[in-house]
Amino acid sequence: MLALQILIDGFAISTLFALGALGFTLIFGVSGVLNLAHGGLLVIAAMIAWYVGTSLGYGADWGALAGLAACVAAALLTYLGVVRPIERSRAIPARERELFVLTATLLWGVMIEEALSYAFTNSPVTVKPLIGGTIDLFGVSTPINELLIAAIAWLAMGGLWLLVNRTRIGKRLLAASINPRGLTLLGFELGTIYLIVWLVYGALAGIAGVLLGSFLGSGSGYIPGLTGSAFTIVVLGGLGSVSGTLIAAYIVGYIETVTAYLISPSLRDVPALILLVVVLYVRPQGLLGRR
Amino acid sequence: MLAGILVLLALLPLGANGYILGVLTTAFYFAVFAMSWDLLFGYAGEVNFGPTFLIGLGAYGAGMANALLHAPVPLAILIGAAAAVAGGVALAIPALRLSGPYLGLITLVAVLLLQQAIVIFAGVTGGEIGLSVPDVLSIDSGPNYEYALAFMAASGLVLTVIARSSLGMILQAAGQDRIAAAALGFNVTKHKIMAFAVSALFSGLAGAFLVFYLGTASVSAVVDIAIGVRVIIAAVLGGRRTIIGGAIGAIFLIVAGELLRPIGQLSTFVVALIALTVIVLFPDGLLGLLPARRGS
């Protein structure tokens, strides 16, 4: 019984982790940016969804849409206002650009955190689920919302796969991740491609943020932890590797769920951190890294 | 000019009240955190996201030595510094194999694990409430201020000398091109471990002093990732690869945060905004704005 419960809960959590970390790895793969304001974007989506849906009373579906739109806008602002000025700055040597992007996005995340707790509240909120009620699944009473979350998350990930593998835009994104200079030489504007990838990233983070908010709750205090989880999953799977991220998300999700159920909920992130240290010592490029 | 500023600062207790001295005392310890971080990042090129791992080891090492073993304050500070150096060498081992974001993550994880360990072993560490130490440096703000100022000046001097010595040069060379530096016959491994040990020594000492100034060691004061972020911001804000820039950035951050306190919750937001603006528009930091350095 407990095993089945762990299996179902772990599946929903892991799927959300995968979706949440996917955008992070996409941005790194295509444009080489590690966005440490990632958690901030997830929480923006959830807080706006909660504000419009619950506080203003427009209902769960309008709330979710508003959250998604806010997250896309925030992702664009992150790129245009923070990341692009650094990438184009002549005063920053190329060797140090990475650290500048890391520091700047970290600061941006702090600003998002403070602004959210000032504008709304700093106590955690729960986004209204799209569908309420529970269903009996092999004898385990499971919220329908939990199943819906897993389904939406998989749909979003499937959509990303189609976009990357079956459309012309996707092929350009792929090409940009392999050889940006080659793509520029073929006459494609790299700036447009980066803009598109940040749009896609915003949408993925928005969906993940709203769903996370309806499953685990959300709040400005969650931001550092969410960024940390995404970073952990992505590095464990191998930076820039999509399938690695998926595998790592399920490993981390199940390890956390098992720890929470069998040992203690307060220790839930410890085993995953230890696993991460071990993996980085033995295999620094992560499970499926391409370095 | 620098000596003049230091003399002025040393004379400050004659005219300033306890509140100003208290703010500056914290800022001076923070300055040492930022300067030690700059030695690792600015010179050795190591992305250390976990300065608070070293600071926390120093702080809790000293605090526990004093509270549990009843070690006198100077001995406790040395024990804390030794714990931090051991931690620094432990961080140096992955740094020899990993670089960039990977090392950054390992150092971040080290902080998280230290934080969890403190909470799990709450019996000896005080857990989330914090560990209060029986002894303090002084109960007066004046002497506390002078201790902090002297410690900051001495640390800044030693770190600057180290950074400008052959060790600093070799670290810079190895940070830019490790293989070339090794090919010139320098023992890169030894120098990197040295850099981590020196940075850890000063971080640990500063953390230990801070505990005996505050009278308590707590996760939110010396281990939390938010503190580490502020250390990094201070060093980059002041001007990286300068050592003294770390001190300027740290004092600026703390004093600005204090001046903005009247606007309440938004003060952190404004400080982060200022730091972000400086980093994006003036990557050489506050020191880079000085006309003398711009020419060089």
Image: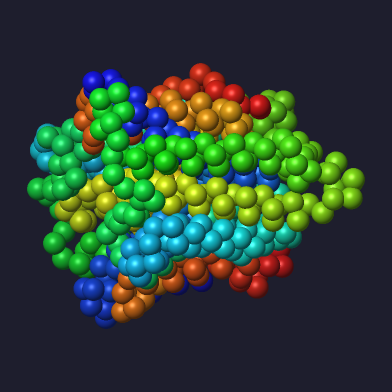
Which residue occupies 67% across, 38% down? A162
Residue B76 falls left or right of residue B193: left
Residue B172, picture quadrant? top right
Give coordinates of residue A58: x percent, y percent: 39, 66
Give coordinates of residue A177: x percent, y percent: 72, 39
Residue B240, picture quadrant? bottom right
Q: How many marks?
A: 0
Which residue occupies 56% across, 27% down? A244
Please name whichever residue, B134 or A19, is drawn nearer the observer in this view of the structure.
A19
Please name whichever residue, A285 or B52, is drawn nearer the observer in this view of the structure.
A285
Residue A45 falls left or right of residue A119: right
Image quarter (top left, top right, bottom left or bottom right) of the C terminus of chain B: bottom right
Please name whichever residue, A232 or B57, is drawn nearer the observer in this view of the structure.
A232
Q: Is residue A103 above or below residue A261?
A: below
Give coordinates of residue A81: x percent, y percent: 61, 65
Give coordinates of residue A133: x percent, y percent: 29, 44
Which residue occupies 40% across, 30% down? A11
